[in-house]
Image (cartoon, coloured by chain):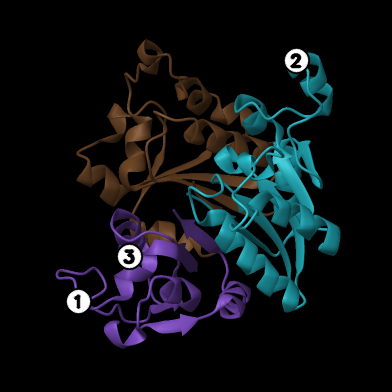
Chain colours: A brown, B cyan, C purple
Amino acid sequence: MKTLFFIINKSLQGNVCGQEFLDMALMAAAFDQKVVLLFEGEGVNALVKNQCPDGLQLKNIVPVLNALPIYDINDVLVEEESMTMWGLVEEELEISVHALSRRAIKDQLNLADHVFSF
Amino acid sequence: MKISIQINASPYQYQAADTAWHFIQAAIAKGHKVYRIFFYHDGVYNAYRDSRPPGDERDIVKRWSGLQLEHDVDLVVCVSSAQRRGLLEQSVALKVGGYEQALSDGFRIAGLGLLMEAVIESDRHITFGA
Amino acid sequence: MLYIVNKKGDVLRNCLDTVSTDDVILLIESAVYAAVNKPQPSVLSERISGVAIYALLPDMRARGIDVARCYEYIQYVDYAGFVDLVEQNNPVRSCC
């Protein structure tokens, strides 16, 4: 089993790339790999509540986030420094996450077999 | 070293396809194995058979096809990315579009499973994006 | 970890935010402009200790950037060297 990190450091809304990126993570989980989702930088905003992309006829990715445990993806990390920078607290997020410092995240990242970004 | 490649950006508008091409040439020259190239997001346009660049420009699509012929590199286009963008495979193209298929020689269309299989098989997975 | 960075600006800045000792950064495509020591302020003006920064020479030549105009601590690779960096470092993170 390999450890695969999927890093979301930009918005998941507005184009199809975020959605297609999450599809990769779900597929990796279906292959029984250890999947870790990491939200950092601007990407932490992808987790906030009250996203209504439907008004713009954009696909809503929030149901995918809520379904992550069904796919056995339970490691969802957010970078504390990014949360602070964007003035967010965990209660404002759509799903439960593990908030870790940049340093602690980097230690985990260094042990990953592959790192994905988009 | 066994390497898999992912290309996420359309050709010509971004340098990704060119950078990946030169990287792959260098890797093969050094004796590394390029296991698979997976075309994802707008990267699927790298496979579009009707691409016709002016004669004095590199032909990116033909270059990939040649790589498959010469070095037997597996060129896989993501089916869901491709269908979303109108690049249909043989069975669907005939039925829906009334044409043979959108992919150039040497490319095949398949699901994300082939990306993951390549990732698991490879020592390195390198993404070239927009 | 090897960071492959293809844009200067935010993409490079975000990468620099997360690098740590023993990391390697490779500047490719238009990110090679970040190696030039003229623009002020510049994100690479202060060397990060323990982090090696490479620029892809073919991308420098394509843009007419002379290494004489670049920070002295920058190192250079061609595509063969790019492959070597990938072989020597894991994991690899593409920053686009």
**Foreground mark, 2 or 3?**
2
Task: Determine the chain carrying the residue at label 3.
Answer: C
The amino acid type of the residue labelled 1 equals Lys
Q: Is residue B102 above or below residue C74?
A: above
Taking the spot 49% from the left edge, 28% from the top edge, the residue there is A65
The amino acid type of the residue labelled 2 equals Val
Q: Quadrant of residue A55?
A: top left
- Left or right: A22 in relation to B52: left
Q: CA distance from mark 2 to mark 3?
A: 48 Å
Task: Determine the chain carrying the residue at label 2.
Answer: B
Q: CA distance from mark 1 to mark 3?
A: 19 Å
Mark 2 touches mark 1? (CB < 8 Å)? no
**Foreground mark, 1 or 3?**
1
Q: Is residue A55 above or below residue A26?
A: above
Task: Determine the chain carrying the residue at label 1.
Answer: C
> Helix, strand, or loop for circle 1?
loop
> Helix, strand, or loop for circle 3?
helix
Per the image, the residue denoted by label 3 is C16
Taking the spot 31% from the left edge, 34% from the top edge, the residue there is A90
Q: Residue A7 at x, y = what percent?
A: 47, 48
Mark 1 touches mark 3? (CB < 8 Å)? no
- Left or right: C53 in relation to B83: left
> Helix, strand, or loop for circle 2?
helix
Q: Quadrant of residue B99?
A: top right
Taking the spot 51% from the left edge, 81% from the top edge, the residue there is C77
Per the image, the residue denoted by label 2 is B96
Q: Residue furthest front?
A: B55
Q: Is residue C40 visible?
A: yes
Q: Is residue A114 visible?
A: no
Of callouts 1 and 3, which one flags the residue occurring earlier in the amino acid sequence?
A: 3
Q: Residue furthest left?
A: C40
